[in-house]
Structure formats: structure tokens, C-alpha cells
Image (cartoon, helix red, strand yellow):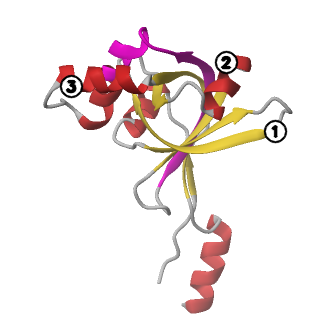
């Protein structure tokens, strides 16, 4: 049985966005005040300008961290834990209400499409005082998949062979 060989496929910006758009499970990494990383599992999307968008509350650690140090990294995961993934690094901003309202509509659309009642959605976002994180990608790694290094897979296949 052939072993799965790990891959790391470099992509341009368009290829990155094509990979990310259908994937919404992410790990967001920000920088705490003491310099250590703070990571949060989040749901995210891609807006029309190619930025990663994540909804949050203004008092969350990730928002406070980004206000202080406006850079972030995001690992975008596939539905299957063993599926392809990519790390994106970028400049970040936090947008609060009332400025976040239209951006939160765009965020929702990027993940779930059209809402059955946009007035209701907007009212809920205002009531909750939601904020939006936007990350502009400045660099990214290859789209990676797990598996054996090619030489190890070949040796194991020969052994089984």
C-alpha cells in the first residue's frame, strides 16, 4: 500500500484565496503583552478585498492584543483534521460598532451566504456590540498536507513490497 507523501505547494495570492474561501475553521494567533502567542480557534472568511475576516467581541484577548500589536497569523484548516492547511501572516485591524456593522454583513456573507433577515442580523450585531477583525495577508506559507517525507514513504513501500 503506497504511503501518503507530504506536500507543500507554493501558491500566489489568487491561489491562496481560492484555497481559503471555502474553509472557515481557523486558528488565530496574536501577541500577548508579554510577547507570548495567544491562540484562538475561530470561524473566518475572506472579504471582497482578499482580507481574512473574523467576528469577535471588543473585550476578547484577541481584540486587545491586536489593538496593541496589529499583526496576526492564521492557520486555515480543512474540514478533515488531516487535510490541507496554510499559515497566513498579516497586518490586522479591529473595527468596532457602529463602523463594523456593514463589515459584519460582508463577514456573514463570506461564510454562510445570504441571511433571511438582514435587519434582524444587523440589530443582533448592534445589541451584542460585535467587532470585526480584518487581516491583510502580507505573506503565507505553502499549502501543506501531512504525510511521510517522500524518501521515507519510498523506503516503507519497498519494505512492504
Asked which secondary structure carries label 2, the reply is helix
- Residue designated by label 2: 67
What is the quadrant of residue 62 in the picture? top right
- Residue designated by label 1: 36
In the depicted structure, whether residue 79 falls above or below residue 11: below
Question: Which residue is found at the position 81% from the left and 29% from the top?
Answer: 33
Q: Position of residue 14 (x, y in %)?
A: 42, 26
Which region is colored magenta?
84-105
- Is residue 15 at all visible to an observer of this figure? yes
Please say if the residues under marks 1 and 3 sit with CB atoms less than 8 Å apart. Answer: no
In the depicted structure, whether residue 161 falls above or below residue 73: below
Asked which secondary structure carries label 1, the reply is loop
- Residue designated by label 3: 120
| Disc on res. 87 | none
Image quarter (top left, top right, bottom left or bottom right) of the C terminus: bottom right
Q: Is residue 96 magenta?
A: yes
Asked which secondary structure carries label 3, the reply is helix
What is the quadrant of residue 32 in the picture? top right
Amino acid at each position: 500500500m503506497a504511503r501518503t507523501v507530504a506536500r507543500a505547494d507554493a501558491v500566489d495570492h489568487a491561489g491562496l484565496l481560492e484555497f481559503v474561501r471555502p474553509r472557515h475553521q481557523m486558528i488565530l494567533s496574536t501577541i500577548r503583552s508579554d510577547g507570548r502567542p495567544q491562540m484562538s480557534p475561530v470561524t473566518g472568511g475572506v472579504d471582497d478585498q482578499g482580507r481574512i475576516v473574523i467576528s469577535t467581541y471588543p473585550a476578547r484577548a484577541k481584540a486587545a492584543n491586536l489593538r496593541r500589536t496589529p499583526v496576526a497569523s492564521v492557520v486555515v484548516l480543512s474540514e478533515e483534521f488531516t487535510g490541507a492547511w496554510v499559515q497566513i501572516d498579516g497586518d490586522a485591524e479591529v473595527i468596532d460598532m457602529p463602523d463594523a456593522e456593514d463589515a459584519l454583513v460582508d463577514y456573514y456573507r463570506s461564510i454562510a451566504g445570504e441571511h433571511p433577515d438582514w435587519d434582524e442580523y444587523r440589530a443582533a450585531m448592534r445589541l451584542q456590540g460585535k467587532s470585526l477583525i480584518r487581516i491583510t495577508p502580507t505573506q503565507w506559507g505553502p499549502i501543506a498536507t501531512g504525510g511521510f517525507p517522500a524518501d521515507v514513504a519510498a523506503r516503507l513501500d519497498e519494505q512492504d513490497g
